[in-house]
Image (spheres, helix red, strand yellow):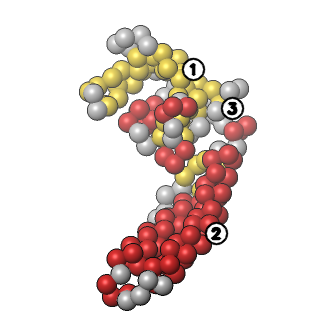
């Protein structure tokens, strides 16, 4: 059974553009490299040719993986999101109970995760630990540094509403 992933419209378009780029420019570039290597003579001892063919195989694997992701991708309608509990595309403000530090994260799919912009994966330890929690609830989450306790302070939709 394929895993369904949820995306913002922007995130899904980014994946579609990446796939299109790989199918057009990426394939053209690899074909050029193979042709160049082929022109250098004996293929049985041509390391450049072997490397270009390997790169072609890897490129096609990446294309197949992206196609699979896109075939199981769904866009979340942010206007119908339930903000009473943390879910995919929730923007959640949490407080570290130990040091009082507050931080806001948006829970997104693994492919859209980007810690620099405050987007964490629903599959990450913190993401998993927050799913389903309501404002005022606390949760203990096992992270690489040990156990951490967080309190959910606020839940809003991804677009800031």
Of marks 2 and 1, which one's residue comes earlier in the chain? 2
x 69%, y 39%: residue: 78
Asked if residue 70 is positioned above or below residue 134 in the image, the reply reads below
Mark found first going from the N terminus, 3 or 1? 1
Residues at circles 2 and 1 in contact by the CB criterion of under 8 Å = no
Quarter of the image containing the C terminus? top right
Find residue 79 and report its horizontal and vertical position in percent: 73, 37
Separation (CA) of disc 2 from disc 1: 44 Å
Q: Residue 24 has which mark?
A: 2
Residue 127 is situated, as x and y percent measured from the top left of the image, at 45, 35
Q: Residue furthest front?
A: 40
Relative height, residue 31 to residue 146 (above, below)? below
Asked if one can make out residue 97 in the rendered structure from this viewpoint, the answer is yes
Label ID, residue 154: 1
The residue positioned farthest toward the top in the image shown:
100
User: Callout 3: few (<14), some (14-19), or many (20+) C-alpha neighbours within 10 Å?
Assistant: few
Residue 27 seen in this snapshot: no
Examine the image and state in which quarter residue 37 appears.
bottom left
Image vertical order of residue 143 relative to residue 73, above or below: above
Q: Which mark, by number, is residue 159?
A: 3
Q: Residues within 10 Å of mark 1 (few under 14, many from 20)?
A: some
Q: Position of residue 124 (x, y in %)?
A: 41, 39
């Amino acid at each position: 059974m394929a895993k369904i992933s949820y995306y913002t419209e922007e995130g899904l378009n980014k994946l579609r553009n990446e796939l299109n780029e790989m199918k057009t420019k990426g394939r053209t570039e690899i074909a050029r490299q193979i042709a160049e290597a082929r022109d250098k003579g004996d293929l049985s001892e041509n390391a450049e040719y072997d490397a270009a063919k390997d790169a072609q195989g890897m490129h096609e694997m990446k294309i197949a993986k992206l196609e699979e992701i896109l075939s199981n991708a769904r866009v979340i309608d942010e206007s119908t999101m339930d903000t009473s509990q943390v879910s995919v595309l929730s923007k959640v403000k949490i407080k570290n109970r130990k040091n009082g530090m507050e931080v806001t994260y948006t829970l997104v799919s693994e492919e859209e995760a980007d810690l620099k912009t405050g987007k964490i994966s629903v599959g990450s330890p913190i993401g998993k630990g927050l799913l389903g929690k309501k404002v005022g609830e606390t949760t203990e989450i096992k992270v690489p540094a040990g156990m951490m306790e967080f309190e959910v302070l606020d839940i809003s939709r991804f677009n800031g509403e």
